Image (cartoon, helix red, strand yellow):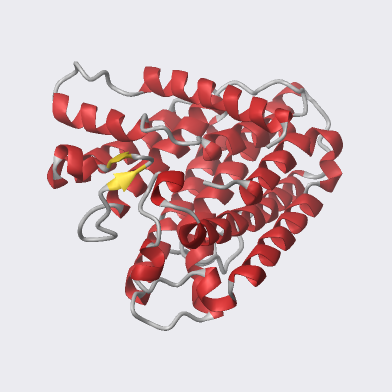
Amino acid sequence: MTSEVQQLLTTGVALTDETLERLLPAPTVEPHSIHRAMRHSMFAGGKRLRPILCMEAARMVAGTGTLPQGAVELGCSIEMVHTYSLIHDDLPALDNDDLRRGKPTCHVAFGEAIAILAGDALQTLAFQTISQLPAPGATLVEIIREFSFAIGTGVGPVPGSDLPGDLPPGMIGGQVMDIESEGVKPTAELVERIHRAKTGALITTSIVCGGLLGLGHCLASGHKLACTEEDAIARLRTFGESAGLAFQIVDDILDVTQSSEQLGKTAGKDTASDKATWPAVYGLERARKDAASLIADAFAALEPFGKSATPLKSLAQYLVDRTH
């Protein structure tokens, strides 16, 4: 990891954690159990990659070199939804895991009922937070629309939006496909659909939503965009889709090459559950090459932004170079 990426991550984690501390109910607020459960999972030591990607996309599109107002809160909203998905993913009815980020999973620490409700509460708080961002109403509507599509089960044509009419299912749709594919021989088409939806959709929306917020600030300040509004969002979407798929491919690789101690979660779960993974379909060598190729595609998408894209590119490279 370069010193520049280390600085990005350190600063981004500090900003995110400080803001989450302010946004989340204190553990002393009743009902105590659910607020403690929410905080248990939110502050379990995550890398905060999604909020950091969101913040850097907003900064790049805004074009001023400074972080647009509301970008940290937007990133925190995305992290809330990511954490809710992990709480539910770990439940006995889904992956049935007792370790997450090196700590007991939420249902192990607080029981299934409170864990389910903690996930629900984090998702609700995420949308509440977005609704209060300091941005034009039209920008907030576009962010909420983009965000909700990425979380859900799939969409058709969306009139009046830049979203294409043939999107893959969102995060929840990807989770369903993942569950229903267990025990089924994985195919290249299936594993790509699951990865683009279950993991890639939330990474992509982190970048696109950050870009939408940055775009609102850019237009309000009169700053000249590096490309048209439509092209800027399309390029961010391409970047997010490529980097998001690469991220999940690397996760698949790490699941079969690293220990539970190194990962902070149970290693080998994907193989044991016969899950559809990139190495299962293509093997480890091809998986590594595909991740590198996807990052090259991601880099190409940001070329019009010049040097201001360096932080996002550095983060994307980190996604494939990481070891946990």
Q: Is residue 16 above or below residue 85?
A: above
Residue 43 found in image quarter: top left
Q: Is residue 107 above or below residue 215?
A: below
Task: Residue at 69% x, 56% y: name it.
Answer: 238
Nearer the observer, 263 or 230: 263
Residue 220 can be seen, yes or no: yes
Taking the image as shown, residue 307 lies to the left or right of residue 31, namely right
Residue 227 found in image quarter: top right
Nearer the observer, 78 or 101: 101
Task: Residue at 71% x, 20% y: name it.
Answer: 66
Residue 160 can be seen, yes or no: no
Q: Is residue 172 above or below residue 18?
A: below
Task: Residue at 34% x, 79% y: name it.
Answer: 183
Expressed as whole percent of the image width and height from the top left, the position of residue 244 reads 59, 54
Task: Residue at 13% x, 42% y: name it.
Answer: 111
Expressed as whole percent of the image width and height from the top left, the position of residue 276 reads 45, 72
Nearer the observer, 264 or 204: 264
Taking the image as shown, residue 292 lies to the left or right of residue 108, namely right
Expressed as whole percent of the image width and height from the top left, the position of residue 324 reads 52, 46
Nearer the observer, 66 or 297: 297
> For the N terminus, which image quadrant?
top right
Expressed as whole percent of the image width and height from the top left, the position of residue 204 reads 58, 50
